[in-house]
Amino acid sequence: MKATIIITLSILFFITSCSSNIREGNEITESELSYIKELGLLDEDESIVLFDSQSSFEISGNFFTDRRMACYWQNNKPNEDHATFAYYEDIDSLTFVDRISDISYASYIEVYVNNSSRFKVYIDADSTKSYNFYNKSKAQWSIVNE
C-alpha cells in the first residue's frame, strides 16, 4: 500500500513537473499585461507573442513580442531582481541551449545584444515546445532585421 502511494505521487510529480507554462499572447490577462508594462517591458501598442514562467507570473517571466525579447525575475531580493530586454534591431544574434536532459535546468535562448551585453530568456518545456518558442522568436527577430 505504502509503495503504491509513493509510486503514484512520484508519477504525479513527474507529470506536473514536465508540464509547460508557455502561453500565447492572447492568453495573458489585462492585469498581467499591466504588471509587465509597470516593469517597463511592454509598450501600449506592443503585443506579446509567447510567454513562459518558471514560477508565479509576478516572480518570473520570459517572453518575446512583436518588437523585443524580454525577461524578468522579481523576488524582492534587490541583488537578484532584474527586468531586461532588447529590441530586435539591437540584437546581434540568438542561440538556443537545450537543457531538457538536465532535470533541474530550463532550456534558454541566449540573446546577444549589439552593445556586447547578453541575457537569457528561459523556456521550461519539453524539447519540441522549447524549439518552437525559439524558432518563433528567431522568425520574429528576422522579420525586423531583413
Image (tube, grey):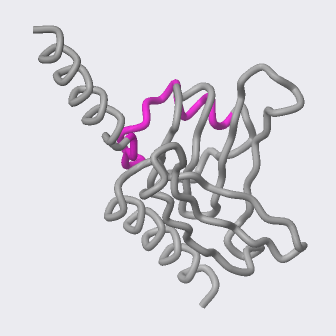
Q: Main secondary structure of the magenta part?
A: helix
Q: Where residue 29 sits: x, y (%)? A: 43, 30
Residue 7 position (above or below residue 124): above
Q: Which residue does the image show at 65% across and 46% down from the upper left?
A: 42
The residue furthest top is: 1
Q: Examine the image and state in which quarter residue 1 appears.
A: top left
**Magenta highlight on residue 26:** yes
* 47, above or below 88, in the image: above
Q: Quadrant of the C terminus?
A: bottom right
Q: Looking at the picture, tell me which residue is in the foreground, 93 or 10.
A: 10
Q: Quadrant of residue 73?
A: top right
In the rendered structure, the answer to whether residue 112 lies left or right of residue 43 reads right
Q: Which residue is drawn at 72% across and 24% down?
A: 75
Pinpoint residue 78: horizontal percent, then vertical percent.
Answer: 87, 26
Residue 84 percent across, percent down from the top left = 76, 49
Q: Which of 59 and 103 is in front in this view?
A: 103
User: In the picture, residue 85 is in which quadrant?
Assistant: bottom right
Hey, which residue is sitting farthest bottom in the picture? 146
Q: Which one is nearer the viewer's eye here, 66 or 126?
A: 126
State the extent of the magenta-drawn residues as a range: 21-37
Q: Residue at x 43, y 37 (%)?
A: 28
Residue at x 67%, y 57% (from the top left corner): 120
Image-based side of 15 in relation to 51, left or right: left
